[in-house]
Structures are given as structure tokens and as C-alpha cells.
């Protein structure tokens, strides 16, 4: 069976449209990549919001909680009160 030029044209035209739909600038493949990036960025925003909330709580405690400030100084600067000493174990 020999295809007519007109039929051949429509077959190639439809194949072109399908390829454009899948691989074009606004095609399905690009949409899939954009959705993937969106999920990554949403997760990143979520983590940054959690870290921001944690840091805001820490700032609040550093402003108003003397015991927390003392604990931070002891941990970070390894300071002790008078008549105290630190014992390090291996």
C-alpha cells in the first residue's frame, strides 16, 4: 500500500505535534522538570522556615532567660564558676 503525499504530510504533522507536546518549551517533559524543582524549593523553604523559627526562639531566650545565657556561656566558652572544675574523660 502506497501512501499519498497528503496522508504522509498529516502523519508527519501529527508526529511533530506529539513531539512538540512532549519535548517542546512548554511540553510535558519541561512541566515534569518544573514540578520537580518546585518540590525541591518548597522543601528548602520549609527547612529554612523551621530554622528561622528555631533561631527566633533562641534569640528570645538569649534576651530574657539568664539561665539559658549561663548555659550557653558554659558550653560555648567552657567557663566555670568559682570553686568548680571540669573533668575530661577519654
Image: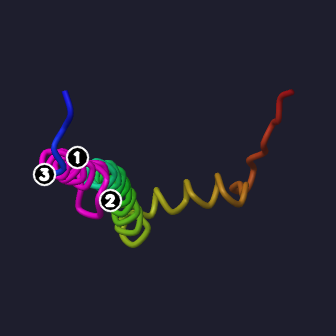
Label 3 belongs to which residue?
A: 6
Give the magenta range: 6-29
Front label number (2 vs 1)? 1
Between residue 2 and residue 62, name the one nearer to us.
2
Q: Residue at x 39, y 57 (%)?
A: 51
Q: Front-most of 35 and 50?
A: 35
Main SS of the magenta part reads helix
Residue 1 got which mark?
none
**Residue 26 part of the magenta segment:** yes
- What is the x, y in percent for residue 14? 16, 48
Please indicate whether residue 19 sits to the left or right of residue 59 in the image: left
Secondary structure of the residue carrying tag 1 is helix
Q: Do tag 2 and tag 1 residues touch (Cβ < 8 Å)?
A: no
**Distance between the alpha carbons at the discs numbered 2 and 3:** 54 Å
Residue at the far front in the pictured view = 2
Q: Which residue is mark 2?
A: 45
**Image quadrant of residue 64?**
bottom left
The percent position of residue 17, horizontal first and vertical second, equals: 19, 53
Task: Tally the marks.
Answer: 3
Q: Is residue 27 above or below residue 66?
A: above
Q: Please tell me which residue is depicted at 16% across the width and 44% down the height of the picture.
A: 4
**Which one is closest to the eye, mark 1 or mark 3?**
3
Graded by Cα atoms within 10 Å as few (under 14), some (14 to 19) or many (20 or more), the crowding at tag 3 reads few
Residue 43 percent across, percent down from the top left: 33, 50
Amino acid at each position: 500500500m502506497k501512501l499519498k503525499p497528503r496522508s504522509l504530510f498529516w502523519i508527519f504533522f501529527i508526529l511533530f505535534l506529539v513531539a512538540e507536546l512532549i519535548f517542546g518549551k512548554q511540553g510535558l517533559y519541561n512541566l515534569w522538570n518544573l514540578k520537580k524543582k518546585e518540590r525541591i524549593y518548597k522543601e528548602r523553604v520549609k527547612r529554612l522556615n523551621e530554622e528561622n523559627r528555631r533561631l527566633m526562639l533562641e534569640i528570645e531566650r538569649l534576651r530574657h532567660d539568664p539561665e539559658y545565657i549561663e548555659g550557653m556561656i558554659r558550653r560555648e566558652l567552657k567557663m566555670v564558676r568559682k570553686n568548680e572544675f571540669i573533668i575530661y574523660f577519654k
